Amino acid sequence: DLAADRAALVSLRSSVGGRTLFWNITQLSPCSWAGVTCEGNRVVVLRLPGVALSGQLPTGIFANLTQLHTLSLRLNALTGELPSDLAACANLRNLYLQGNLLSGEIPEFLFSLRDLVRLNLGENNFTGEISAGFQNFTRLRTLYLENNRLSGSIPDLKLEKLEQFNVSNNVLNGSIPERFKAFDSSSFLGNSLCGKPLANACITAENSSSIVVPSSPTDSGNGSKRKKLSGGAIAGIVIGSVIGFFLIVLILMFLCRKKGSKKSRSIDIASIKQQELVIPGEKPIGELENANGNGYSVAAAAAAAMVGNGKGVGEVNGAGAKKLVFFGKASRVFDLEDLLRASAEVLGKGTFGTAYKAVLEVGTIVAVKRLKDVTISDREFKEKIEMVGAVDQENLVPLRAYYYSRDEKLLVYDYMPMGSLSALLHGNKGAGRTPLNWEIRSGIALGAARGIQYLHSQGPNVSHGNIKSSNILLTQNYEARVSDFGLAHLVGPSSTPNRVAGYRAPEVTDPRRVSQKADVYSFGVLLLELLTGKPPTHALLNEEGVDLPRWVQSIVREEWTSEVFDLELLRYQNVEEEMVQLLQLGIDCAAQYPDNRPSMSEVTSRIEELCRSSQREEQDLQLDVVDVDDNSSR
Ligand SMILES: Nc1ncnc2c1ncn2[C@@H]1O[C@H](COP(=O)(O)OP(=O)(O)OP(=O)(O)O)[C@@H](O)[C@H]1O
């Protein structure tokens, strides 16, 4: 009686052999076990690494698991040949059988699993030659065959996508085919192979007289093959090395100089940028005329009236007559009077104050942020806010206007109708929830990365300082817009609630001094949140959250990678590769040491590349569907 929990599985480790366990899996619904992920009632991921499975895998199990996407039986004691019904798992992408006692030739039926992306058959007792059938795996990225007893030569397989390859410690011989030469020599050691990347060249008619051929393990007793280098070859090597050495020294000197000159030029880039960013000639709205020729009169109480701190609209036109200042030419579609008459509703309280949604009488909707704890001087505030207002990039929420008085500071933004990524991910978990597919999530990741990259491109000291999912807002089409940039420098440190804690890089001590690399860290956490659907530490009220970088890394280390993804994403199996790449990028960004993190421009190009690749996958899939339809109609 296999109870549906991990405890039962663990207690079975030592007492039950593979046969019984597998037999039962086909009869029960194992969907709630750790290591087993199901979609509907079909098993898509089956992972039983290191659970003491032994004996031969019986035929008949896999015929019932046709939706399998990942099968991991690593580090068990399975023996014998692979069962032929494994061929029924036509959706299989990841097959990990490493570290068992499987034997016999790698069976031909395996090559019918054409969608395999990762194949690990290492550390078994497989014999025979490496079949040309591997050629069928056109999507293969990982092929591990090390520590078996495979013989013969390596066929010239045209596996365009292969990234990881290892055939070390077999009994292979012959030359390493051209397309495998790019892999590290450690992938080929412990065989009788020759040619690059190994140090021992292959003996050909031309070079047999001048090249030393170190004896391989199999011909170690045959000293007659040792030949000495010719004088010309030695001279060539020496001259080549000397030239190479000087070239490296020259390049290093050049680089050092470049770095030095950059440093001296970058002095006060921030202030230069500031000048570039200011739009000259902006008039406060109070100085503009409305259609009736009357000037607008605005006072500090405008803010209070709208945000409901007790004063009415009638008290707005009081003393002080400070002005609402707009940015940009095309944005004056409403005026301050409209704003004052607007109905307002609270969107939420954040680090810098409270945000309101204001619906103007003409129907225009804006978001208004009422800042608190602004500690800097008037001049400094205006300088900084005008820099923010001048920023114009499609992935950033534009600041349309600001209002400044001693008691009130208001910022007017475009209202983003779909709310924040945080609300979308963690808000409505019920039936009416918008499913967030891979296309939407990867698009959001790309848009947000582009927005942050743009900010970083404004100067080495320009950073966002508060990257988190509630600051990634969404348009009607779920395009990402980064908000709240430039505000971290305006408010005092005391006002920062710890809701940002899970995103903050470990080296940040002052929230007003957040480096670009610290932004990259926060963006990494955001990527992990986007892919796992889990909030980071303290990101939500009343929820503790998880230390996302640590949690994800611990799971990836255990090769349970698929388990970290939000269940909603698991159905997009054709792009799992890209999902894993985005996850890896998140992990890279959230590296402990700032120097180990990529720059935002690198981050953006990596996301662009994986978005392109998933679009290709999507097109392939559509073509496949067309093919199937064609075949069935014939
Ligand atoms: N322009 C906008 N359009 C739509 N919703 C917005 C807009 N600006 C803010 N919001 C929403 O209002 C709420 C409060 O935002 P606010 O930026 O004040 O706080 P926060 O993002 O939670 O924290 P922080 O101040 O640290 O950024 C958030 O849910 C946010 O998504």
Image (cartoon, helix red, strand yellow):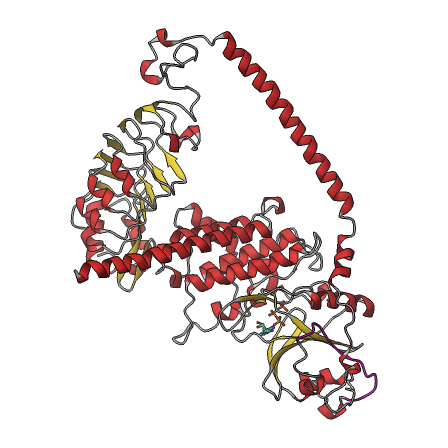
Residue 494 seen in the current view: yes
Camera-side residue: 278 or 9?
278
- For the point 65% across and 55% down, which residue is it? 456
Q: Position of residue 484 (x, y in %)?
A: 64, 67
Total labels drawn = 0
Q: Which residues are drawn in magenta?
A: 317-330
When the figure is inspected, residue 262 is found, relative to residue 425, above or below; the finding is: above
Magenta segment, prevailing SS (helix, strand or loop): loop
When the figure is inspected, residue 378 is found, relative to residue 323, above or below; the finding is: above
- For the point 58% across and 47% down, which residue is it? 597
Which quadrant, please, contains the N terminus? bottom left
Left or right side of 413 for 532:
left
Which quadrant, please, contains the C terminus? bottom left
Q: Any magenta on residue 392?
A: no
Q: Any magenta on residue 327?
A: yes
Ligand 1 position by quadrant: bottom right
Q: Position of residue 404 (x, y in %)?
A: 77, 76
- For the point 57% across and 66% down, which residue is it? 481
Q: Position of residue 600 (x, y in %)?
A: 59, 52
Q: Position of residue 511 (x, y in %)?
A: 69, 59
Residue 590 seen in the current view: no
When the figure is inspected, residue 615 is found, relative to residue 313, above or below; the finding is: above
Q: Quadrant of residue 286?
A: bottom right
Camera-side residue: 138 or 551?
138
Left or right side of 284 for 61:
left
Camera-side residue: 309 or 115?
115
Left or right side of 219 for 64:
left
Q: Quadrant of residue 316?
A: bottom right
- For the point 42% across and 52% down, which residue is it? 613
